[in-house]
Amino acid sequence: MVFSSALFIFGFAPIFFFCYFSVPERGRNPVILVASILFYAMGAGTVALVLMGSVWLNQFVARRLVVSDRKNSARLLAMGVGLNLAALIYYKYTAFGWNIVANMFQGLAGVSFGSAPRIVLPIGISFFTFQGISYIIDVHRRRVLPASGYFDFAVYHTLFPQLVAGPIVRYIEIQDRLYRRSIDLGRLTEGAYRFCLGLGKKIVIADNLGNLADQIIKLPSHELTCSHAWLGILCYSFQIYYDFSGYSDMAIGLGKLLGFDFPENFNQPYRSANITEFWRRWHMTLSRWFRDYVYIPLGGNRRGPLRTYFNLAAVFVLCGLWHGAGLNFLIWGMYHGALLVIERLLDRHLHWRPRGPLAIAVTFALVTIGWVFFRIDDLGAEFTYLRAMFFADTADTIYFPIGYFLTADTMTYLAIATLFAFLPIEKLTALRPDRLGLFSGQLCFGIFSFGLSLVQLASKSFNPFIYFRF
């Protein structure tokens, strides 16, 4: 089930919130837990047992970490992290590893391993695995005490607004709200607005541009021109941003309706003047996770420049593989790691870091080129597409000229996407003379976004969430 589906908007959500606000405060956590398990099981089926196993494992380890001495605590932590990663590797990377080994033996010795085993991937396993790892590491570091019981930890670990596609919410960020939450009209209004805003991003912008991106990227190479290639990947750049940031907005909005404050996950990343800034604005909870639990433990930038470059490269190789089990994701991670290392070298030796409008345009172009590796999973097709982008046209027969795709609707959606991706919105809100004006504007915009989303939802079937597969 996705937040942008009729089943959720007209079925699950109304029933859940009716039950949630009908019971006294002490009864709301059980409502959340039951609803979260139901929400997950409706999409995952019996694979939901993996999530329940994650609940038991991480709480079991956390409870014993606080009563163990230093030596045993380190062993327990290693066991907990190892088991979390073992489950992630088994479900997400077994087929990937199998195919690599099978191709290697096929090429070297002519030995056939057969087809890779078919393993059902639990929805959102990358997200709740990282959440569990951060929990036991924070307990080990004495930054937080474990939840008071398995029930309380289960409420946090299965919390349905952020369960399957983030943001990656750490226990330390919402631990107090697990036991006491205040909900008032202002919080409810803000939560509803954020949900409607995210729904509009997803349905109105991401889905329309994503449909066009799919049509163009799937064109045969002999029909692909430079203009086609750039239009297709530009549409995908906006699709993935509005799809994922829209989901994050909906998750944050639902959290506020429940009394939780989830961390922000996007901050207009396409306004970044360099790749370093981009990763401080894009999927911020993932970036902070890798910084705190991988980059800094590896030594960060404290062990000299060469070690810093290695750490950056290693983190982004892992970041690429976190997104998917495929060589294209590995290349995408290496690409961003290389760009970050180049920026560090320029800053260190030339004391230069890109800034200004031209730097924003160049950074957006570099990120957009990188999305080719993310979107296309066939290496040959990736490089064919890149050749077409850089004027090495492979087209010899054009059945659909660029004007076929550049309709009035497409131009409108691209204009809206560009406006909200690059417009300094925080300056506009700062100019408001009072909060009443801001509140009224949000209310009107939220109602408009919700209504337009419902109209479009009723008229089309293209409604995938890109990050659900992670």
Image (cartoon, rainbow, N blue to C red):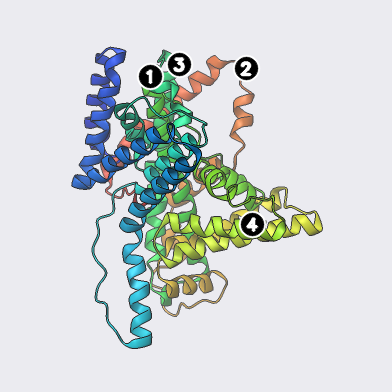
Secondary structure found at label 3: helix
Q: Nearer the viewer, mark 2 or mark 4?
A: 4
Q: Are marks 2 and 3 in contact (CB under 8 Å)?
A: no
Give neighbour class at mark 2: few <14, some 14-19, many 20+ (Cα, 10 Å). few
Q: Nearer the viewer, mark 3 or mark 1?
A: 1
Q: Left or right of 166: which side holds 28?
A: left
Q: Nearer the viewer, mark 2 or mark 3?
A: 3
Q: Nearer the viewer, mark 2 or mark 1?
A: 1
Give neighbour class at mark 4: few <14, some 14-19, many 20+ (Cα, 10 Å). many
Secondary structure found at label 4: helix
Taking the spot 35% from the left edge, 53% from the top edge, the residue there is: 88
Residues 183 and 56: in front is: 56
Q: Quick one: label 3 or label 1, which is nearer the N terminus?
A: 1
Give neighbour class at mark 1: few <14, some 14-19, many 20+ (Cα, 10 Å). few
In three-dimensional space, the C-alpha distance between marks 4 and 1, rounded to whole angstroms, equals: 41 Å
Taking the spot 39% from the left edge, 35% from the top edge, the residue there is: 64
The residue wearing badge 4 is: 340
Residues 147 and 444: in front is: 147
Mark drawn on residue 60: none
| Amino acid found under the numbered disc labelled 4 | Leu
Q: Is residue 408 visible?
A: no
Q: Quick one: label 2 or label 4, which is nearer the N terminus?
A: 4
| Amino acid found under the numbered disc labelled 2 | Pro
Q: Quick one: label 4 or label 1, which is nearer the N terminus?
A: 1
The residue wearing badge 2 is: 433
In three-dimensional space, the C-alpha distance between marks 2 and 4, rounded to whole angstroms, equals: 41 Å
Q: Left or right of 52: which side holds 217?
A: right
The residue wearing badge 1 is: 179
Residues 439 and 283: in front is: 283
Residue 337: x and y in percent read: 59, 59
